[in-house]
Amino acid sequence: MYMHGAKWLTYETGGPKGADDPYGNPYGNPSPCFRKKFEARGGVERAALDVSAVGVFKAYLNGEAVAGDYMSPGWTDYSKRIPLYTFDATDKIRARNAVAIVAGDGWAVGKLPPAMLRCAYFEKIEVCARLIIDYRDGKRDVIVTDLDWEAAATEIRRSDIFSGEYVDKRLSLPGFALYGGGSEGWGKPSLNHVKAYFSAPDLSEFLDRARVAPTVVKRMLPGKFLHKTADGKFIYDFGQNFTGVVRAELNGDRGATLVFRHGEVLNPDGTLYTANLRRVEATDTVILAGGGAEEFRPLFTFHGFRYAEVAVQGKAEILSVRGEAMYSDLRETGAFSCSDPLVNQLYSNLVWGQRSNFLNLPTDCPQRDERLGWSGDAQIFCGTAMFNMDCRDFYRKYLTDIRDAQLGAGAAPCFAPAPFCRGRLRAGMKAAAGWSDVITILPYEYYLMYGDKAAVKENLEAAKGQVRYYAGVSENYVPRLLCNYGDWLGTEKTDTDLVAVCYFALSAKLCAKLCRIAGDGDADIYEKLYADIREAFRSEFIGKDGAARSDTQTAYLLPYAFGLTGADETRPRLLAAIARQNDRLSTGFLGVKYLLPVLCELGESALAYKLLTNTDYPSWLYSVVNGATTMWERWDGYTDERGVQNPDMNSFNHYAYGSCGEWMYKYCLGINPVEGAPGFKKVLFRPFIDPGGKITRAEGCYQSVNGAVKASWRADSAGAFLYETEVADGIEPLYDFGGYKSAERRGEGAFLLKVW
């Protein structure tokens, strides 16, 4: 996409840093600002500002931010596409104007995992912009980035997503986005001469309309002062683990410095715990200009944290602090609550896990030196995510990232975007069962929830490529993979070959479904392949006595959920595997999604609710009773006996185990999409109510693309429950109460259900 006449501008604010000597120069240069002053006529009909950057940007017009976005244009594989955002500027045009764009290192120029080197894609920041003003008389003005613009170094002396931001208020540019702003310190930018680590004769050919809503501040969290540490630092608690920044109002002498550090938990002595951040500094620094109250809010970074530590150097006071929770501007579409307050907190935790990790792409965690779009986490959580929020554009963008990073052999990567690592190699370019299958699972789940065939058609060839890859590396239908995470972080180890062949079967099965949805003629091929895999699986992994290899909970959950085994053979073995764990779960990232649904399908709803409401380790509620406000990466992220788990891999904000949210909607409430009428043109109400009394009431809703769907139930008498439903006009309700002794209609959408 070309913006005719617009040039890519850069500005030297310092010498090379991080490109040739990444370890010796871990920080970047001051953030540049690009400015253009212009005059406009009266009678503006419409004004639109197109902006993109190699790096991240914040755009201003006449002294105000053009929009509430942060970290735009986000992260993609910049060697294939650079997002372009368009902002409505109609109400901001005056007779005399100034447009300004401040830019930071971001993902394109700053550090990127796993190597944590700077300049993975580009050596320096660049910006490109076009302002189009349409007048009511039919005439048009177009202002584009060119050498007539001005440029200057800003008070942001360095910025990085992982290191944080360093701001010197003494170096601010007065009126930087005003027509009457001063000229001191301003110079001239240069045209596109920035080195890219890929073939890029003209970056405009990589411009692509942004595919996801911008990152914005969605919630404000007041900071509560807790205490002052022995070494004089102030500790604040925001009451919630989240992703964002601290906005502070400060007052102090000129040159006084305040250093903000961020962490998820505190040490026993009340100091900030940061060991689990690994190579991340997560530190924001501000030097005050003095002369009165000053506001500090970093522009070009974000942190995952609940607590902030503030160190004051010099004479200064902290007037107020608040946390600004940032994530993609997605509309929340689901709600769930029940009679158990701990389960309600679990639901809140999984929603906050999604909020924290849906910043431009579905990341694994927001705090440490990772923050990558891990595909295994994404596929296991996508059903929950699409109930919680409207993820249509968000997942379409992520699927584009997956396709952009797809291996030459056809396999989807373990995470996307796959960092370019300065042109020498791409990280994450490996296939893994349960991770690579995102390219078959997500398009199908997307179609069920939204009824959009376009997403299926866009990803069908990539899905076929994944199945072909599996077939090409398989021996007797068992994929031999270089990377096989298996049932990641389960308390019992499940045979990784069993996991791999199960996902090979699932991807073949879903590929057949995707072909039929798209009208592609290859569906029969993939259905035959699925049947062959099923036969080979049973021969290789299921013994004559019905025991699965490794005999774990996941070893029974995946085959049954994917149609490889039947109910009669699965039920006794799965129940025995659970009993061996004293009626506690042992599943990891992959198995956990299917634990509660499979138990319900096997007629063991009471056991499902027992596992859900268990508070002993390992369980969902173990983290809740230990004060969690988001999902933990590990079941044992913290224990009373050992304290905090090994910091090498211990995130307190990972959403994978929150995949139980899908069960809350589909099984507890009974709200299900219908494959033959996707997007909730029809809804199947099929609840699995708790017969054991652990939960006595549940209610919730989902705002589908075709309207609202609501469901609730409560104990009416011994062994009977009143189940009530409501749907928007145009949605056809279907009911399945086959698991109940009787279902007596009590009104429009209301039934008295009696359990056996």
Image: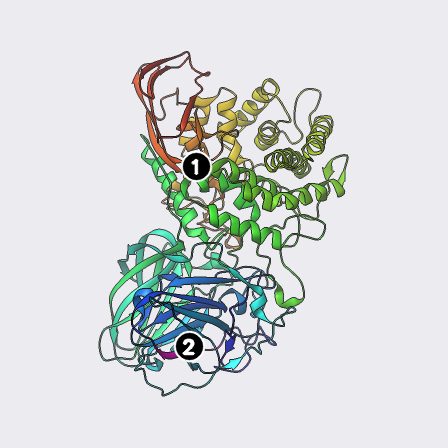
The residue that label 2 is drawn on is 33
- The quarter of the rendered structure image containing the N terminus is bottom right
The residue that label 1 is drawn on is 661
Specify the farthest residue to the right. Answer: 475
Residue 396's mark? Answer: none
Magenta highlight on residue 30: yes
Q: Amino acid at mark 2?
A: Cys
- Front residue of this view, candidates 398 and 84: 84
Magenta highlight on residue 540: no
Q: Amino acid at mark 1?
A: Gly
Residue 710 vertical position relative to residue 194 in the rendered view, above or below: above
Magenta: main secondary structure equals strand
Kindly indicate whether the residue at mark 2 contacts the one at mark 1 (C-beta within 8 angstroms). no
Q: Position of residue 162 (x, y in %)?
A: 48, 64
Q: Secondary structure at mark 2?
A: strand
Q: Is residue 531 found left or right of 359 in the rendered image? A: right
Marks 1, 2: nearer the viewer:
2
Task: Specify the segment rendered in magenta.
Answer: 29-39
Instruction: Count neighbours of disc 1 (C-alpha within 10 A) and say few if under 14, some if 14 to 19, many if 20 or more.
Output: many
- The quarter of the rendered structure image containing the C terminus is top left
- Front residue of this view, candidates 731 and 151: 731
Residue at 59% in and 17% down:
568
Q: Position of residue 692 (x, y in %)?
A: 39, 20
